[in-house]
Amino acid sequence: MLLVQFKSGDGRHVGILEQDTIRVIDGYATTYALAQAAIRGKQKLAELAQAAAGEKTVAFADVTVLAPLDHEDPAHCYVTGTGLTHLGSADARDAMHKKIGGDVETLSDSMKMFRLGVEGGKPAAGSAGAQPEWFYKGDGSIVAASGEALAMPDFALDGGEEPEIAGLYVIGDDGQPYRVGYAIGNEFSDHVTERQNYLYLAHSKLRACGVGPALLVGELPEHIDGVSRIRGTDGQVRWEKAFVSGEKNMSHTIANLEHHHFKYQLFKRPGDVHVHFFGTATLSFADNVQVAPGETFEIEAPAFGPALRNQLTVIETQVAKVSAL
């Protein structure tokens, strides 16, 4: 099941995507409200959504798509992620295994982290495995829906896509996380800043991101095929590359990544929303592509329905004037 949040002439809605149309769910204006009802009623989200689906349908092309899950107060939405989790294509996988072989002390810190995941990122069910790389991106205010711009600050050295799958969660009244589903995402980073020194990773990740347009309810397929594209200002594709995801192509299980995020009490505050990116092995920056303002990122995977599209823009930042009190 794919859920879509959207706005039309009569306000906000959530509905079930049925090819090119959306079947409106009655009684719930948001995915968040629907998820909270499912949690409190101890129901599966797909069952509740199907039961509440009405007769009204609207064309997907006629609505304004919203992010697939949000919170009315953006400060109560955490956007985070993990890196060094994906094995990549067969060729990339073979090259990576050669890199991490041999004496661990000769490896860079990044390769040591990757090796930890390969060796211990898929523990037995119910057990905790190797701890992944983790980063904070921002709150709900940084999330762009499909069709909205991805704003790069004017001090950024780069603005590049990262095609990823994100897990979307709501923390229940019992203080436990509930996975609402998964969405395709553009984690979007400043790779030039990060490459200067890996300790700049935190700076490079404090950027906008794209999520959606649809929310996949249920379990994530073990193998996901997708395509990432850069379209020039003329709309023509100037870079394109396939990517794979899903646990079959990862060095960590989803459960292990979730464990190491939600083990912190800070991230189990009732009512909060979490958008957690699971990583990638494909990006245009690795092919020496620099994306210019006005160009469009397009990330598509059939399992997630319509493509995620966001145009890159630059915003002028105000220098903070700190005053002593």
Image: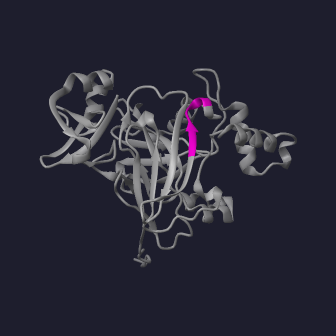
Q: How many marks?
A: 0
Residue 325 falls left or right of residue 22: right
Q: Is residue 186 above or below residue 288?
A: above
Question: Given the current orientation, which residue lies at the most extreme right position?
Answer: 103
The percent position of residue 107, horizontal first and vertical second, equals 81, 48
Question: Which residue sits at x=50%, y=68%?
Answer: 292
Residue 108 falls left or right of residue 80: right
Q: Is residue 41 visible?
A: no
Q: Nearer the viewer, residue 69 or 177?
A: 69
Q: Is residue 209 magenta?
A: no
Find the magenta span and give its range. Answer: 242-248
Q: Is residue 317 above or below residue 276?
A: below
Q: Nearer the viewer, residue 74 or 277?
A: 277
Q: Is residue 89 above or below residue 287?
A: above
Q: Is residue 298 above or below residue 95?
A: below
- Choose top left, top right, bottom left or bottom right for residue 279: top right
- Choose top left, top right, bottom left or bottom right for residue 268: top left
The percent position of residue 227, horizontal first and vertical second, equals 51, 44
